[in-house]
Amino acid sequence: MKNPALVKKYARAFAQAVADEREFAAVGADVRAFLEAFEAHAALQRAVVSPFVNARKRQAVLGEVLARLGTGPKAGRFLRLLQRHKRLGLLPEIVDALPEAWSERLGAVTYEVASAVPLTEAQRGRLARGLEASERRPVRLVPRIDPALLGGLALRKGHIVYDASVEGTLAALRERLGRGTQRSS
């Protein structure tokens, strides 16, 4: 991630600016639609980001693109703010951070759950209930498939990783065995 502090700042500001789940989805869809166009066209990226293009011209190009995409006013203001502060380059990371920022606003904790195979609905439900009991507040799970895992789960909450995978268990065992042989020498 280019600048995690700024990404979080803008994602949180976005989450605070929307009124409810419906507006979050609608404004988020507009921002994602712009991001798709932005990533698909290098000329557009240069036109709205390049310091070699006059600031008024950059603003005009962005305005035209937003009009063609039918972008709503709130998403337009957000994208113009990013452009004005020279942060449009962070847009992919900001969009990725939006669900977590929204969960935080709602008081939920986000866990990224890595597993070797997709978890069933029942497994996700049991895991969420267990984490909610431990956190004492709602939990949002973001599942991810990691083919490198042989079995088990790896959970990430912010910068904290809970490794309940086969590899993690074996690594911990290897470390304990290594410490045991060092003491007996």
Image: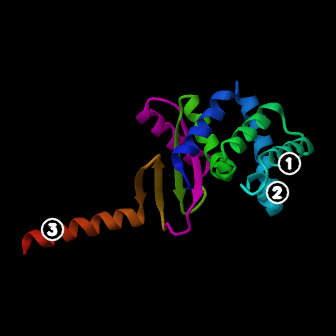
Disc 2 to disc 3: CB gap under 8 Å: no
Tell which of 183 and 89 is nearer to you: 89
Image coords of residue 168 (percent x, y): 38, 63
Q: How is the image coloured?
A: rainbow
Q: What's the residue type where badge 2 is placed? A: Leu
For marks 1 and 3, the one nearer the N-term is: 1
Image quadrant where residue 133 sits: top left
Q: Does 116 sit left or right of 58 as displayed? A: left
Q: What's the residue type where badge 1 is placed? A: Val
Q: What's the residue type where badge 3 is placed? A: Gly
Q: Which residue is mark 1?
A: 61
In magenta, the rendered stretch is 120-149
Q: Which residue is mark 3?
A: 180
Q: Which residue: 9% across, 68% down? A: 183
Q: CA distance from mark 1 to mark 2?
A: 8 Å
Q: Which residue is mark 2?
A: 44
